[in-house]
Amino acid sequence: MADQASRPRSFGQLSPEERPGPGESIVVLGLGRFGAAVASELVRLGYDVLGVDEVESLVQTYSRHLTHTVEADVTNVDAIRQLGIDEMTHAIVAVGSDIESSILATAVLDEVGVPNIWAKAVSKQHARILERVGAHHVVLPEHDMGHQVAHMIGGRMLDWFQLDERFAMVETVVPAELVGKTLTEAAIRQRWNVTVVCVKPSRGNFTYANAETVLGKGDLLVVAGETESAEAFARVH
């Protein structure tokens, strides 16, 4: 279970049964920085979002940005039922900094039968507890960002995303030795065992790459492959 917590999945990695449908309502419990960011992005993606927090000022602030906001105790099972949250299919517990409240809120959502519960954790131990009380997906934002920064320090890696335990995508600058070559000539797959997903010319936009794509100085590449292979390619100068 701890491995699941350290490698959270995005909505795009969920099965069709787990994903919220178009226009479906999602509740976010806790409107701190993390909760507000998640809720606002969900609204931008087209979901109806109910934001719940005990702090009146936060509820008022985000009432202009979210579909609905309510001031309520997120650990109170009666309040959760009165808000109709027990009828929702997706809930996000974003009160990770208040460990006791996050655990209680997760347990309440599990008690009322919400089938897909996401929860923010501040430590792996916290994540394990959240899973035991009912969380189906646990995220560790600080841990994940630290992991990402560690991978990006050094070399030419600009961004890094772990798809699972052994597979990753990295964004990196075209190595000097490949400048002026087509992808066929560069033989990136044969030499580094990674696949070029797309390329962004230094003065253009990301586009699909093909065998005849010429790699220019300062171009960006997004490559995918086994984690060690992708990271090795990003270290090539």
Image (tube, helix red, strand yellow):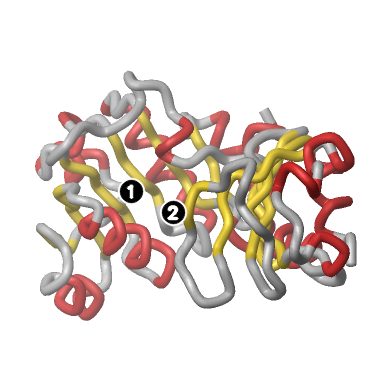
Q: Is residue 62 above or below residue 168?
A: below
Q: Is residue 6 visible?
A: no
- The answer to whether marks 1 and 2 mark residues whose Cβ atoms lie closer than 8 Å is yes
Badge 2 density bin: few <14, some 14–19, many ≥20, Cα 10 Å: some
Badge 1 density bin: few <14, some 14–19, many ≥20, Cα 10 Å: many
Q: Which of the 4 quarters of the picture holds residue 199?
A: bottom right
Q: Image point 19% across, 52% down: which residue?
A: 49
Q: Which mark is residue 75?
A: 1
Quadrant of the drawing holding the C terminus: bottom right
| Secondary structure found at label 2 | helix
Residue 178: x percent and y percent?
Answer: 81, 60
Q: Which residue is mark 2?
A: 101
Q: Which of the 4 quarters of the picture holds residue 117?
A: top left
Q: Is residue 166 above or below residue 188?
A: above
Left or right relative to 187: residue 222 = left
Residue 70: x percent and y percent?
Answer: 14, 60
- Amino acid type of the residue that numbered disc 2 sits on in the rendered structure: Ser
- Pick whichever, 79 or 109, lies toward us: 109
Left or right relative to 47: residue 166 = right
Residue 41: x percent and y percent?
Answer: 31, 60
Q: Is residue 85 visible?
A: yes
Q: Which mark is residue 145?
A: none
Quadrant of the drawing holding the N terminus: top right
Q: Image point 33% across, 27% down: which residue?
A: 111
The answer to which of marks 1 and 2 sits earlier in the sequence is 1
Q: Is residue 226 above or below residue 101?
A: above
Q: Image point 25% across, 39% down: which residue?
A: 77
- Amino acid type of the residue that numbered disc 1 sits on in the rendered structure: Thr
